[in-house]
Amino acid sequence: MNSGKKSKPNRLIKATSPYLLQHAHNPVDWQEWGSEALNRAKQEDKPILVSIGYSSCHWCHVMERECFEDNDIAALMNEFFICIKVDREERPDIDQVYMEAVQAMGISGGWPLNVFLTPDQKPFFGGTYFPPPQWAQALNAIHKAFQSRRPDINQSAEELTRLLASSGTSTFEKQSDHVFTESLQRIFQNLEKKFDRTHGGLEKAPKFIMPSIWSWLLRYHYHTRNTEALNHVRFTLKKIFYGGIYDQVGGGFARYSVDGEWFVPHFEKMLYDNAQLISVYSEAYQVTRDDEFRQAVYETFRWLQREMTHEQGGFYSALDADSEGKEGKFYVWTHQEVLALSGEAAEQFCAYYNVTPAGNWEHGVNILFRKENIPPPLHLDEYRTTLLHHRNKRIQPGLDRKIVSGWNTMTIGALVDAYHAFSDLHFLKTALKAMNFLETYLITNSTVYRTWNEVRSPVEGFLEDYAYLIQACLKLYEATLDEHWLEKAGRYTEKVFADFYDPADGYFFYSGREAEQLIARKKEMFDNVIPASNSVMAQNLLWLGELFDKEEWRITGRKMIDGLAELIISEPNYMSNWAIGWLAAHTEVAEVAIVGPEYVQFKNELKNQFHPTAVILGTAGESKLPLLQDKDAGAQTTLYVCYNKTCRQPVYSVEEAVSQFPVR
C-alpha cells in the first residue's frame, strides 16, 4: 500500500482541538462534527464514518499511522463515506451516544471508536482499533452493504436508535428496603470480596485508577472504625505509589497499568486521574499522617505545575503515552544510563528501583518501581533530580494543551483538599489562579464552555463541567469562607436546574437544553474513572441544601441517591461516588458555625482533620447564610455544632467542637 502524509492540510486545520489538529495532514478528507458535514452526508446520500479518540490515546496514534496516513485506504474512505473526526474530550456527548451504540452491538468499547452511521446519524456498525487489512476490508464491505442492503441497514439503525433513546434511569432505578447499618455493611462486603490482597485495588487487570472507591472506604472507616477498610486503602495507595504506574522520577500517575500489579503503565498521564489522586492521598494523609502520602501529593503537584499548567493558571488535559512513535520511550531507562547518572550510589539506586542489566521490561529497558523492603540510598532526591534533568533532554511526549472546564474545576477542588490537609497556602493560591483563568476564558454570564486552546471552543459545557464547577465553588468557600463563592455555586445550580433537569425522573441530562440535539439525549449514571456527573450533582445538592437551608435541593439530592440505592449496595465498584453521597444522605451532618476574629484559623485547624460529614461555615461579623444568623461574633471566637437546626452548647476550641460530633 501507498503511505505517507499529504502536505496539503484537510479541513481539520481550522480546529481548536489538539487531537483533531493531529489529523489535519492526513490524506483523509476529515471534517469536524457539525452542520456542514452532516448536511453533506444527506445531500450526497453517503454513510457517515465517525472516528472518535483523544490526543494521548496510543491506539488512536497507531491506527492513524497505519490507516489514516495511507493514501490507498484514505481514497476508499473519501470515496465511500463522509469522514468525521471527534475529540471525545471536547464532545463527550457524541462519544457517549456512539459508545453505547457499539456496546449494544456486542462489541467492547474503547478508543479509537469507529462508528458507521446512516446519513441521518443513526448507527449501524462499529468497532475500535482495526489493523490496515481489516479496515480496508470493512470499508469495502460496508460500502457494498449500504448499496445492496440499504433497507436492512436502515431498519437495524432505527431499532438501535430507539434502544439508545429509551435507555433511561428506569432500567436500574430501585430503592432499597434495607436498614442503614445493614446496607452500609453490604456495600463494604461487596467491595471487600473483590479486593486484591496481593497488589491492592480490585482483583483484575488492567488496573485503572479508581479514587472514588478508596475515598468511600475512608468514609466507611470514619463511620465504622473498620480497620480492614483503612488497611486496604493504605495498602493500595502504597502499592500504586511504589509501582511503575507512578512516575518515580518526575511525579504524577499514569492512567492505568496493563498488568494486575501496577507495574507496566499505559504511560499517558491524564489531568483527571491526578486531580482525584491528589484528593484521595490528601484525605489518606489526614487519616494516617503517613509521610509517603504527603510525598505523593507534593510530587504530583510539582509535576502539575512543571508540565501541565498554562502561564495564566489553567491546567492542560493530558500527556501522551508515546514519544518518537514508541509507547513509554520517554520514561524508561537502560541499566547503563542509570549507572552513569547515579554515581557512587549506583548499585543501591538500581536495587531500590529494580533496575537490571537485562531490563525489567521489554527490549532490555527498565521501568522504575519500588519494593517496600529495600532502604533508599543516601541523597536519593539528588539522584532523582539528576535523572529528571537528563530525561528532560529527550524528545518529550505530546502535550494536549486543551483546557477542559470540568477537569480544571476537579483539580481546583483537589488543590483545596491538599491545602486543608497540609496547611500550605501554595495549593490554595494555585487553585484560585486556575479559577480566575476559567472565569476569564471559559465562563460568561454563568454559561460555562467546555474547552479552551488559545481560543475558546463554541461547545457549551456539559453537566460534568457545571457539577465540578459547583463543587469547586463549595470547596473554595470552605477554604476562604468568602461567601461570594457560595453565591456563585447557587447561581450555577439554578442554571443546571433550568438547562439540564428532567422532572420526569428527577435526574439531570448530560447536555443542556440548548445543546445540539443528537439522536439520543443521555444521562450519565455510572461512576467510572471519572465519577458520574449526576452523582457529583447529587452531593452538591445535599451540601448546598445544608448551607442555604434549602430543603428542596436537599430533598432532590437525596431522592436521586435513594432511587439508585439497591444498585449502590449491590454494585458499589460502579457506584462508588454515589455510595459517598448515600453515606452523606443517611448520616447526621454536623453543621459547624465558627464566628469571631479567628474564624479562619479555627476552620483550618478543623479542616486539617478528616471529618467528611461536617459542613463548615464561618464569619467575623455579619453573614447572609441562615446557619450563621443569630450567632454572636464577640471578641472570643466561638464554635457552634448543630444538627437538624438544633445547636449544642457553644464552645471555644476545635477539640471541644469535635467532641460534640456523633460518637463513632
Image (cartoon, helix red, strand yellow):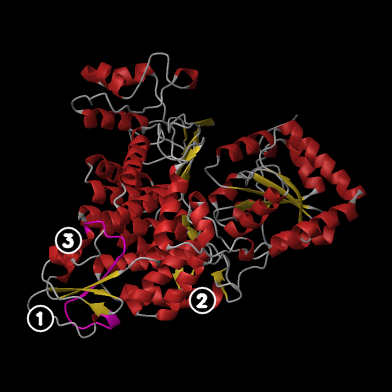
Ranked by sequence position, the earlier of labels 2 and 3 is 2
Instruction: Determine whether the residue tagged by mark 3 lies in a helix, strand or loop.
Output: helix
Percent x, y of residue 501: 55, 74
Please give the name of the residue rendered at 10% of the width and 81% of the height, measured from the top-left corner: 634
Percent x, y of residue 545: 38, 75
Q: Is residue 223 left or right of residue 327?
A: left
The numbered disc on residue 497 is: 2
> Which residue carries the number 1 mark?
634
Instruction: Determine whether the residue tagged by mark 2 lies in a helix, strand or loop.
Output: helix
Instruction: Determine whether the residue tagged by mark 1 lies in a helix, strand or loop.
Output: loop
Q: Residue 378's image quarter?
A: top left
> How much space separates mark 3 and mark 1, taking CA atoms?
20 Å
Amino acid at the residue labelled 2: Phe
Amino acid at the residue labelled 3: Glu
Quadrant the C terminus occupies: bottom left
The numbered disc on residue 545 is: none
Q: Do tag 3 and tag 1 residues touch (Cβ < 8 Å)?
A: no
- Residue that extends furthest to the left in the rendered view of this protein: 635
Ranked by sequence position, the earlier of labels 1 and 2 is 2
Q: Quick one: 108 or 140, which is closer to the camera?
A: 108
Vertical comparison of 9 with 167: above or below: above
The numbered disc on residue 605 is: 3
Vertical comparison of 33 with 557: above or below: above
Please give the name of the residue rendered at 44% of the width and 21% of the height, measured from the top-left corner: 365
Highlighted range, magenta: 608-627
**Dot 1 alpha-carbon crowd within 10 angstroms: few under 14, some 14 to 19, many 20 or more:** few
Q: Quick one: 465 or 81, which is closer to the camera?
A: 465
